[in-house]
Image (cartoon, rainbow, N blue to C red):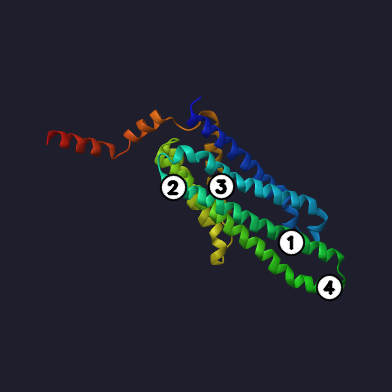
Amino acid sequence: MEAASRVGRIIGVLIIMQMVGSAMVNGFLEAPLFGAPGFLVNAAPHSRQIGLAAVLGLVTEAMWLGIAVTAFTIVYQRTQRMALWFVALAVVILAMAVVENIAVMSMVSLSEAYARASAVEREQLQTVRVVVASARNWAHFMARIIDGVAIFVFYAVLYRCALIPRALAGFGLIAAVLMVTAVGMPIFGHDVVFPMLAPMGVSQLLLALWLVAKGFRSQASMREAAAEQPDAPDERRGEQGAARR
């Protein structure tokens, strides 16, 4: 099996694992933090579940670094700067995940203190609740913005190197812009626009299925795709003109 195809299949599996892990964390494991009557009451009884969510969240975000490192040997040969940018953003993603999950575990600690507190102490802890919850929420929004930027760079690399069909890579670029816009809305005082996140889910699923089935294109396929670019005829005309001179 060709190296590029094998690397592509590995990345496809990582993306699927990442999607499953994210769904578990956001859809189930962290649910007690956001359900009524609030995390102060809910987090302590579900501390193990939320702790598992924190660990799985770290692993899921660390997969971006795994994807970047796995793709590096293939991408670096084609575009060194973008390959380095992708690795750097993957490192930032992991750092942001650590900050976010520290805030998640702080919510658990505050809930445990609330469960042991007297009535007077609980009133005092209520004033801290907003600060702790905001620390988690803003870390979450910032982390998702960095995710979107990293995904944009990833699809830009795939597009430029023609490692996958350019139509699929182009759709991913649009989806990444929509994602960053949607999760960046709270910065300007608006709610997250969740429908704008749907294209990213579709794009990642299509990408993962394509990579698992076919992997990255070979060098020969990439050369053929590059020859089909709009600027290719201009380059050929330039070469022909040089030959005549």
> Which circle, 2 or 3, is nearer the viewer?
2
Distance (Cα) linking label 4 and label 3? 43 Å
Cβ–Cβ below 8 Å for labels 4 and 3?
no
Viewer-side label of 1, 2: 2
* N-terminal label among 1 and 2: 2
Asked if labels 1 and 4 touch by Cβ distance under 8 angstroms, the answer is no
Whether 97 is drawn above or below 212: the answer is below
Q: Earlier in the sequence, mark 4 or mark 1?
A: 1
Image quarter for residue 21?
Answer: top right
Local packing at callout 2 (Cα closer than 10 Å; few below 14, some 14-19, many 20+) is some
Per the image, label 2 sits on a secondary structure element best described as: helix
Q: Is residue 6 visible?
A: yes
Per the image, the residue denoted by label 1 is 107
Q: Which residue is nearer to you in this view: 119 or 69?
A: 69
Q: Earlier in the sequence, mark 4 or mark 3?
A: 4
Give the residue type at disc 3: Ala
Q: CA distance from mark 2 to mark 3?
A: 26 Å
Q: CA distance from mark 4 to mark 2?
A: 52 Å
Q: Disc 4 marks which residue?
A: 121
Q: Nearer the viewer, mark 3 or mark 1?
A: 1
Q: Dot 2 corresponds to which residue?
A: 82
User: Mark 3 falls on what kind of element?
Assistant: helix
Q: Dot 3, how many residues are within 10 Å of its Cα: few (below 14), some (14-19), or many (20+)?
A: few
